[in-house]
Structure formats: structure tokens, C-alpha cells
Image (cartoon, rainbow, N blue to C red):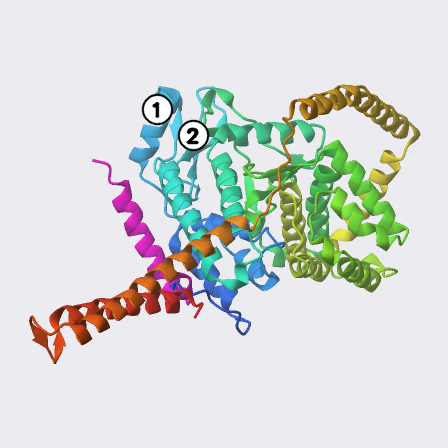
């Protein structure tokens, strides 16, 4: 017998109980919550609620922390403190996963396999091991229950998104369903360890000649969708370093190397690690930096790099009026009626820092102001730039922890200059011109055929014009509700009138309190319907 509905009901009840305990019980009320006074404590309470609800919600909170276009800055600050750390699962489960994925027992597949994991997260945990060829590796094993639990929580999140959209006015500008769908795509990718392995392989190839950065090798023979085997990197996580015992120069060198690695990924490789968290960067025994956890990666296309270059050029030449258009070219979406306001806000932010030395700019404060602008203007960011924003913001804060006087912009400046010089080199310009000429030629060749198709459809009467109105479904729903209430009100009115006529005209038959029994029953039934209708109106908050 399928017990999924029962499990979902139990989980939904638990979510409701936890939400109420942390002050979000109004989400469960059928009335739409009205705008109220700002809640300065909401970020902390939301973080604690996600923490208590478990791994899937922790990861959802981490996703929200990368969405400055839909989440206020104060909440982002709190959600970025969420850590995906849970208790490890038993060794028996590890053995079953290895057997199912490799067709071998742990004893057959490995010379040595440590039972105690060195790290445990919501989707999997990591064990030290030794391969038959004596290679020292780490093996990431997926939790057997992870896919089922995640799918169950995703269904509940989709329901919660619909409820929040209907009942919380402050969320009117957020497409909560889209957020949940984006999270679903993201976390399902994390469930595929072969995708993470391909990311690791790309980073290893890109940093192949770099003596400062180490990326572990993937052992494909021992890697599947639920099992990932990588070379073991010996070192300490950045978070575990005793930086107080380091000299200022060593700390500055470490922060510079970290930042330089990510600027290389972004501006040269156009493929970057999306989570430069202190737990994902190791300081190796030989002084190199080691990268781990490749589940989240971002990729910038050639077109992205060209458009970023144009953005940099306009910023460098004080062409602030063109910045909204450049952002739009990059895929940033904003309400067209607010374009003038956006231009004004960008100009204000731009001239606050224009002419300042990079050493005088606080990168964390500058990033924070940028996030505030994105949220205030309700800008919509493409996913790849959301990941980029998260990577730069995380990198800036980590580098500042390592060396408080560090300025990430000073390291980024030469890369931005090199990007501009490369994109406007004669060879690049000639190549771009030839590509654009070919595209224009292809469009010109397509025009006669497309025009012929349109004329044929007009001649045959098959031309269709589609008109889309995003609010029509909500309007139809509200009309249905209104019609239903009118129908109930008419039934109540009819009951009252009929009961009154019976009470006045009927003389024979049973009476109660001086009224005919049918009249009393009609009044009672009409009263019940009336109370039910009034209760429905009050609960909807639309009296």
C-alpha cells in the first residue's frame, strides 16, 4: 500500500507547526496578510525555521540567499549563514549504495575504506578510501533516501508557494512558483554526481598549467550518478586555519591567490566555481589552494563576455545613461515604466564611487548597496548572473575574513582591463564582424520564405493572433467566487422569503414558537447558509 499521502500529510503538519513557532503562522491563515511594519527580526527567524525543517529547506534557503532580485538584503544576510550539515547515515547504507552502483562490495572495490565520514551533508557524505592501485581518494556517497525526500519536499514547497502567493501581499511581486521550480532544477542537478564529476574535470583542465591551484582528478571507474570518487587533497580548510598566527603578508597573499583564482575563472575561463565558501577551499601542505565541491558552477557565453565588456566600457567612459540598456542586453529584466528611476538610481550609485581609489572602496558595502538596488527596483537576474553574484559576494566576504584590509576590486581591475583589450582587438573585431555579417545574410535569406508563409496563411484564412493577458486566470477565479457567493445569497434570500410566506399564510400543521414548523426550518437553514457565507467572506479578507 502506498503511504506517500500519509507521509506528505505528516510532513505538511510538521512544516505548519514549525512555521507557527517561528512567527510565520499567518501563512496558514486564509486571509491575505496586509502590509505592516518592517520586521527587523524576520531574517533570523526565517533562517532558524529553514534550519529546523531540515536539509531540503536549508538548500532552498541557500538558493534564496542568491536571489537579491526577490529577497530583501536583510534576509539575504541571514540566509547566507545557513550551513548544509547533518548527521551521517549508517555504514550499512553506504555499503548498499556502493554495491548497487559498482556491482562490487566495498572490500572488493577498495583496499581501505574509512567508516567514519569526514563530511556529511543533506545529499551525501564523504569517506576517505584507498583504491586497488594504492591511490588515496575521497568517495562521496549519496544518501539512499535523498531523492525521495527531496521530491516529497519539492511537492510541499510547490503547494506552499501557491498558498504564500494567495495570502501574503508582500509577495505579490515574487513568482514563488518559479523560485520553487528553479530550486527543483538546481537540486536535481546536485543529485547527479556525474554532472559534478564533469564540472571537476573542466576545472582541472582549465587549471592544468597553474602551479597555485590544485583540482582533484576524477576516477571515472568508481564514479556513477550516486557515487563520486576524487583524488584526496591533503590540507586544511580555510575555515580551520589559525590565521591569528599568520603574518599580515601571508594572509594578504592567501586572499590574493583566492581572488585571483576566481577572477581567472570568470574573465579567462568563463566557467567558475559557484560557491567559494571557506569549506570548499583548502590550503594544501605544499602551499597551493585546493578546490572541492563542484556541484554548483556557472558558465558565461561568448555573447555574455562581449556584453559585459560593453558594460565595462560604458562605466569607464561615464556613459551612465546607457547602463540600463546594457543590463537589459545581459538579460536583466525590470519594469519598463521604472526605467527612468533605474537610470537615476544607477547614476546616484555610480557617482558615489566614481573617482575614488579602489583602496578606499569597501567592496562588501558596495556589493550590499548593489543588492539593495536590485531588490528595490525588482530587477530580474538570469540564473547564471545570480550564481556569479553569489560567487563574488561570498569571495569578497571570505577574502575580507582572511585579510580585513583586502580589496577584491584591486585584483579584479587588471582582469577587466585585459578583457576589454582582448574584446576590442583587431582580430576579435574582424571575427565578430564576419559572424554578424553571416547572421544578417541568413536572416535576409529567410525573409522571402517567411513572407511567403504569412501570405499563404492570410489567403487560406489560417492566420492566428494570440493575445496573452497574464491576469485573466486570476480574474476568472475571482468571478467564479463572486458568482458562487451571489448564488448562495440568492438561495438564502429565497429561503427567507419562502419561510416568511409560509409563516404568514400557513394556518394548519405543526407550529413552533407561533410559526409553522416548515417556516422555522427554512429560517434555520437560511441562517446556517448565511453564517457560512459570512465566514467565507471574512476569512478571505475581502469584506
Comes first in the chain, label 2 or label 1: 1
Front residue of 106 and 302: 302
Q: Overall secondary structure of the magenta stretch?
A: helix
Residue 407 can be seen, yes or no: yes
Q: Secondary structure at mark 2?
A: loop
The answer to whether 326 is drawn above or below residue 337 in the figure is: above
Answer few, some or many: residues within 10 Å of disc 2's Cα (few below 14, many 20 plus, some between 14 and 19): many
Q: Who's the residue at 72% across and 39% down the image? A: 266
Residue that protrudes farthest toward the right in the picture: 426
Compute the Cα span from label 2 to label 1.
10 Å
**In the picture, which quadrant includes the C terminus?**
bottom left
Residue pointed to by mark 2: 226
Specify start and end residues of the magenta stretch as a single range.
1-28
The answer to whether 85 is drawn above or below residue 42 in the figure is: above
The answer to if 106 sits in the magenta stretch is no
Front residue of 99 and 467: 467
Q: Position of residue 163 (x, y in %)?
A: 43, 55
- Mark 2 in CB contact with mark 1 (< 8 angstroms): yes
Q: Position of residue 469 (x, y in %)?
A: 59, 47
Q: Position of residue 400 (x, y in %)?
A: 67, 57
Residue pointed to by mark 1: 100
Residue 229 can be seen, yes or no: no
Residue that protrudes farthest toward the bottom in the picture: 514
Residue 218 placement, left or right of 438: left
**In the picture, which quadrant includes the N terminus?**
top left
Q: Quadrant of residue 447?
A: top right
Amino acid at each position: 500500500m502506498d503511504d506517500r499521502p500519509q507521509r506528505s500529510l505528516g510532513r505538511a503538519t510538521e512544516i505548519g507547526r514549525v512555521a507557527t513557532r517561528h512567527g510565520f503562522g499567518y501563512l496558514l491563515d486564509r486571509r491575505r496578510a496586509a502590509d505592516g511594519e518592517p520586521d527587523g527580526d524576520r531574517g533570523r527567524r526565517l533562517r532558524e525555521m529553514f534550519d529546523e525543517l531540515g536539509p531540503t529547506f536549508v538548500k532552498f534557503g541557500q538558493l534564496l540567499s542568491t536571489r537579491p532580485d526577490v529577497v530583501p538584503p536583510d534576509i539575504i544576510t541571514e540566509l547566507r549563514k545557513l550551513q548544509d550539515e547533518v548527521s551521517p547515515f549508517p555504514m550499512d547504507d553506504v555499503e548498499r549504495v556502493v554495491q548497487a552502483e559498482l556491482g562490487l562490495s566495498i572490500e572488493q572495490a577498495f583496499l581501505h575504506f574509512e567508516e567514519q565520514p569526514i563530511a556529511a551533508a543533506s545529499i551525501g557524505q564523504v569517506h576517505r578510501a584507498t583504491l586497488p592501485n594504492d591511490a588515496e581518494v575521497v568517495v562521496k556517497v549519496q544518501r539512499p533516501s535523498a531523492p525521495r525526500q527531496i521530491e516529497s519536499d519539492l511537492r510541499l514547497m510547490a503547494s506552499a508557494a501557491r498558498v504564500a502567493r494567495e495570502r501574503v501581499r508582500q509577495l505579490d511581486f515574487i513568482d514563488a512558483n518559479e523560485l520553487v521550480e528553479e530550486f527543483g532544477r538546481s537540486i536535481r542537478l546536485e543529485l547527479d554526481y556525474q554532472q559534478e564529476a564533469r564540472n571537476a574535470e573542466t576545472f582541472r583542465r582549465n587549471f592544468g598549467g597553474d602551479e597555485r591551484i590544485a583540482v582533484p582528478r576524477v576516477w571515472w571507474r568508481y564514479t556513477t550518478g550516486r557515487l563520486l570518487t576524487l583524488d584526496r587533497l591533503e590540507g586544511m580548510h580555510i575555515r580551520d586555519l589559525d590565521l591569528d598566527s599568520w603574518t599580515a603578508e601571508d594572509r594578504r597573499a592567501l586572499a590574493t591567490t583566492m581572488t585571483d583564482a576566481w577572477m581567472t575563472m570568470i574573465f579567462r575561463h568563463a566557467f567558475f566555481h559557484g560557491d567559494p565558501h571557506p569549506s570548499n577551499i583548502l590550503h594544501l601542505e605544499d602551499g597551493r589552494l585546493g578546490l572541492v565541491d563542484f556541484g554548483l558552477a556557472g558558465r558565461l557565453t561568448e555573447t555574455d563576455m562581449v556584453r559585459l565588456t560593453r558594460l565595462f566600457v560604458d562605466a569607464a567612459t561615464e556613459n551612465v545613461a546607457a547602463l540600463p540598456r546594457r543590463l537589459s542586453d545581459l538579460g536583466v529584466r525590470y519594469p519598463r515604466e521604472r526605467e527612468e528611476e533605474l537610470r537615476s538610481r544607477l547614476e546616484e550609485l555610480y557617482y558615489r564611487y566614481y573617482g575614488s581609489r579602489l583602496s578606499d572602496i569597501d567592496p562588501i558595502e558596495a556589493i550590499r548597496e548593489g543588492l539593495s538596488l536590485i531588490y528595490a527596483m525588482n530587477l530580474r537576474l538570469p540564473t547564471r548572473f545570480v550564481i556569479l553574484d553569489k560567487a563574488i559576494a561570498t569571495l569578497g566576504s571570505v577574502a575580507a575574513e582572511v585579510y580585513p584590509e583586502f580589496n577584491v576590486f584591486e585584483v579584479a581591475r587588471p582582469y577587466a582591463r585585459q578583457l576589454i583589450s582582448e574584446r576590442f582587438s583587431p582580430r576579435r573585431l574582424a571575427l565578430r564582424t564576419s559572424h554578424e555579417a553571416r547572421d544578417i545574410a541568413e536572416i535576409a535569406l529567410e525573409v522571402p520564405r517567411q513572407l511567403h508563409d504569412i501570405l499563404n496563411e492570410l489567403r487560406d484564412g489560417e492566420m492566428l493572433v494570440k493575445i496573452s493577458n497574464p491576469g485573466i486566470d486570476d480574474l476568472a477565479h475571482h468571478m467564479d467566487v463572486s458568482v458562487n457567493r451571489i448564488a448562495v445569497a440568492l438561495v438564502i434570500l429565497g429561503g427567507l422569503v419562502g419561510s416568511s410566506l409560509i409563516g404568514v399564510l400557513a394556518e394548519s400543521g405543526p407550529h413552533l414558537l407561533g410559526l409553522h414548523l416548515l417556516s422555522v426550518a427554512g429560517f434555520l437553514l437560511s441562517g446556517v447558509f448565511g453564517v457560512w457565507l459570512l465566514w467565507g467572506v471574512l476569512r478571505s479578507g475581502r469584506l
